Amino acid sequence: MPSANVRGAQPSADRRLSTLVRHLLPSSARTATTTSTSSSAADADSSLQAFPTMASSSVFAGLAQAPEDPILGVTVAYNKDPSPVKVNLGVGAYRTEEGKPLVLNVVRRAEQMLINNPSRVKEYLPITGLADFNKLSAKLIFGADSPAIQENRVATVQCLSGTGSLRVGGEFLARHYHERTIYIPQPTWGNHPKVFTLAGLTVRSYRYYDPATRGLDFQGLLEDLGSAPSGAIVLLHACAHNPTGVDPTLDQWEQIRQLMRSKALLPFFDSAYQGFASGSLDQDAQSVRMFVADGGELLMAQSYAKNMGLYGERVGALSIVCGSADVAVRVESQLKLVIRPMYSNPPIHGASIVATILKDSAMFNEWTVELKGMADRIISMRQQLFDALKTRETPGDWSHIIKQIGMFTFTGLNSDQVAFMRQEYHIYMTSDGRISMAGLSGRTIPHLADAIHAAVTKLK
């Protein structure tokens, strides 16, 4: 039987509760609760009730409400609109003619194969990701006969879609590259400056789009890159420039390549639309392969969101083409050190879908057919919209709609006209006049053409 001293050393339940209250409450409250250490459980409970809870007071109470993302916020506004004729042309996600999201048949088949394979497990991937996926991704963008691949000069890591690939690449450069300034086209995807700034790079811009011609400001581009400091990083859209849909010609790409190599500018390609722009995987990779063929170094961020419709799976890759095989090995080792504290290792499911399709010739061919089908439908939407505006004799030259390429068209509409179309016609797009051609259908094109006609007629 325990001694009285031992029993006396054991605090009662009420005392333990009172002690807990003193630790949990602010210092000002502790004074009140310590006046009587023998307070009953009921007293302690009433003390708890007397002070603010996290529901009514927070250390984050002073935070301002952050604005909606300028692109994703369009969908938020669209979802709140009860109009039956509303059209969402904001977010870059493919839709069928019926306006529905599309899961490719070959993706469904690959996924079913994975599910039916009893040997598949859910173990962690290596930091660099799924090895087959990395090899096949590099082969897809650089070409099966790429000398860089044959000479083992490419370090590839699986990342969280295109955004994650850009971020990992940006942080790698901020740590290990001597020039921490990156030049991005004006305009560019709205997330680019945020990603690279937070990665630790200084962001500057170069001229790209000419509003007067609604085409490429090629002379301005050359002048700005020509005046960039030697060794600066330059972000290049591999194809289907977002948001303008304006790409350089192959001759212009060659001039860009020569200029950049002469100044030792480091190319950082962003490829979000390979095969989705023209319908040809090889054609949409030509700009990248020109730079690889000269033996120089570059970075490449790939995404499978658009061309395989794997938006929510977040599947992408970062490849760094290096000067030699031994440098590529060291680069990969340093990429691991960037990735490990960021997200440790990438998810397995989406990358397994991609690898299953890319390594099977029959499935690969099926994918290219479906991919071309998506690209062709977007090209058809461009032609139909152009024809509808021409029929209405809408003021202005709208030929840029069929000259631009890829998911987006930079309409040339100003912010007032965009606001008018949202208010009067329930058509949603970003304020810069960018529309997602993939969100259109034969049913919605007349409505959009009516809205554009009214906007440019009533608002200059």
Image: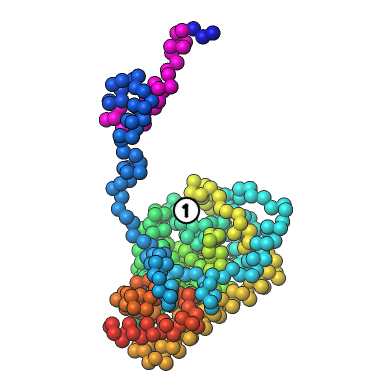
Secondary structure beneath dot 1 equals helix
Determine which quarter of the picture holds residue 445: bottom left
What's the residue type where badge 1 is placed? Answer: Phe
Report the span colored magenta: 4-30
Q: Is residue 188 visible?
A: no
Residue 451, above or below 114: below
Residue identifier under label 1: 172
107 vs 228, left or right, is: right
Residue 322 inside the magenta-drawn segment: no
Residue that extends furthest to the right in the rendered view of this protein: 118
Q: Which residue is found at the position 28% from the left and 21% from the top?
A: 35
Q: Which residue is found at the position 44% from the left and 65% from the top?
A: 235
- Give how far across and how far down residue 206 sits, in percent: 36, 69
Residue 17, above or below 117: above
The one of 9 and 83 positioned closer to us in this rendering: 83
The one of 308 and 215 positioned closer to us in this rendering: 308
Quadrant placement of the N terminus = top right
Q: What crowding class fits label 1: few (fewer than 14 Cα within 10 Å), some (14-19), or many (20 or more)?
A: many
- Give how far across and how far down residue 394 sits, in percent: 36, 89
Q: Main secondary structure of the magenta part?
A: helix
The one of 288 and 308 positioned closer to us in this rendering: 308
- Give how far across and how far down residue 260 sits, in percent: 44, 68
Residue that extends furthest to the front in the rendered view of this protein: 42
Residue 22 inside the magenta-drawn segment: yes
Chosen colour scheme: rainbow
- Give how far across and how far down residue 246 sits, in percent: 44, 77
Q: Which residue is found at the position 30% from the left and 35% from the top?
A: 51
Quadrant placement of the C terminus = bottom left
Q: Which residue is found at the position 40% from the left and 71% from the top?
A: 82
Q: Is residue 350 visible?
A: yes
The one of 324 and 379 positioned closer to us in this rendering: 379
